[in-house]
Amino acid sequence: MTRAGSHVRRTLADIRRGGGIRAALETSQPYDAADVMTSEVAAWSPGRDHPDRELGWARDTVTARARDLARNNGFAAGAVQREVDSVVGARFRPTSRPDWRALGIDRETAQAVGAQMDAAWRTWADDPLMRCDASRALDWGGLVALGYRTYFLEGDALAVLHWDEGATGFRTRLRVVDPDLLDNPQGMTDRIDMRRGVEIDEHGAALAYHFRRDHPSAMWGGQSWAFDRIERETEWGRPQIVHFFDKHRDGQSRGVSRLAPVSDALKMEDKYGRVELQAAVLSAILGVYVRSQLAPDEVSDLLSDGKFLALNDARRELIGANGLTFGGVRMPVLPPGDSIDTVKAERPGGSFEAFEAAVLRRIAAGLGTSYEQLAVDWSKTNYSSARAALVEIWRGWTARRVSFAQRWCAPIRLAVMEDAIDQGLVELPAGAPAFWEAPGAWLRAKWIGPGRGFVDPTKEAQAAAMRVSLGLSTMEDEAAELTGADYEDNLAQLSREIAEMPEGVLHPAQERFAELIGGEHASDRDAGPASTA
């Protein structure tokens, strides 16, 4: 073996042992996703960064673009508003269900405490003076919608719970904070215990939040570089800051806009649509044009009434007093080399509608909705496909509703219930655990938002009745899912309506349950006196 040959073999062995060099030289990989030789993916080389570094400066750009899309792009604005309306709506409210087994009390006592909690919550949330809002602009429905909208567009839903000691009644005040205000003090770079305004411990748990007193772009200035440090909670556990975001990786401290994966597609679709619309408008308003070697003002002067006849004496003698006519229509006579042409209206392009639909389907998939919902186009949808799409979309919206309720709304409700107990609006039974000993058991609740709605009301009402009759669901669940109603409120109202019915007249709710399940075949069953509720 020659010295050169030995050197070559050692070099090849070193290359094979080197992970990155080996991957670059080998022609194939066990996983196609790791192939770095093919032209399709050779230039695709993303890095692996810490989750907070991945956001970094890019978060501000993504957020600014998402806001711009929500302001100026109809599809983006509609997608945001539709999800806010569907997930939290205008009256996102809890129905208390204290865990009586965990608390060691009976069911009736737990229901009585739950009723007090619900009454106290309504007093705080539906205050017509809007004292639940620190800015006195919104009631609870507006606050929760603002919080969810901020989360959708900017990735973070932030709220500060203030305590107003001198207030009459509830002392708890809520402020939904602009995520732009959450930042490192004096603009310092991130460090091991500070990530974009979130102060964390060794486990990554948030300890405190640092807020600017004013927006960094405020025209009046003065407070944008003044910071307040607010601890996440008091020493006994009362929340002071509520922060909701989608945590995709361990170590992530801030969220990113839900529009981030589809922002480029939305912007390019918007440009394409605008260009097509402009072309269509031009085609519609520009019927004819003059092709000439003269300047525009000279052509306009020649085409003015009677002036083009003075072009030269010879043309006047030729066409006479009435000018050149064809089929009774007077034809303009232009200088030699000039002509009048018409615009052929060929826009929008023939493939515009199909192409836009394809782009919107891609965007809808990224947002977790359907093309029909995003484009508000139901022209090619039948009952089966609409129902299937609604089921898929509703599954995602339900998951987000539960997550938002547990991680954003529940801490706020905890603070309000502590306030209510302190005022004596809620009385806990003797011998039961104290509020702070078992907050999860006392505050167990079901959050009710907008109903799913109906594609075919008759079929879906019959299906709901069948689910209840088979024990697969409850009247409470069906009322909440289909219409967003509170079942206990429904029962109270039904009792009142039945009591007010004239003698001998049955309320519709007193008819037999089987009639709703069986529909038109119910009349074939043996008849008898209608049962009463």
Image: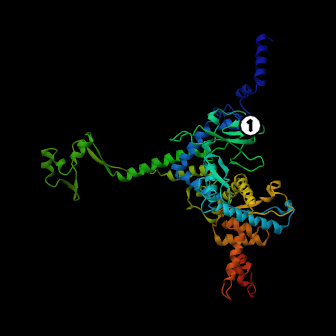
Left or right: 131 as drawn, with respect to 236: left
Location of residue 456 (image quadrant): bottom right
Q: Where is residue 426 in the image (x, y as percent from the top left)?
A: 76, 63
Q: Which of 5 and 527 is in front in this view?
A: 527
Q: Where is residue 300 in the image (x, y as percent from the top left)?
A: 24, 46
Q: Nearer the viewer, residue 395 or 456?
A: 395
Q: Where is residue 150 in the image (x, y as percent from the top left)?
A: 61, 49
Q: Position of residue 511 (x, y in %)?
A: 71, 81
Left or right: 505 as drawn, with respect to 225: right
Q: Nearer the viewer, residue 184 or 150?
A: 184
Identify residue for label 1: 31
Above or below: residue 328 compared with residue 225: below
Q: Which residue lies furthest to the front in this view?
A: 166
Q: Residue at 70% x, 71% y: name it.
A: 489
Location of residue 169 (image quadrant): bottom right
- The quadrant of the picture occupied by the C terminus is bottom right
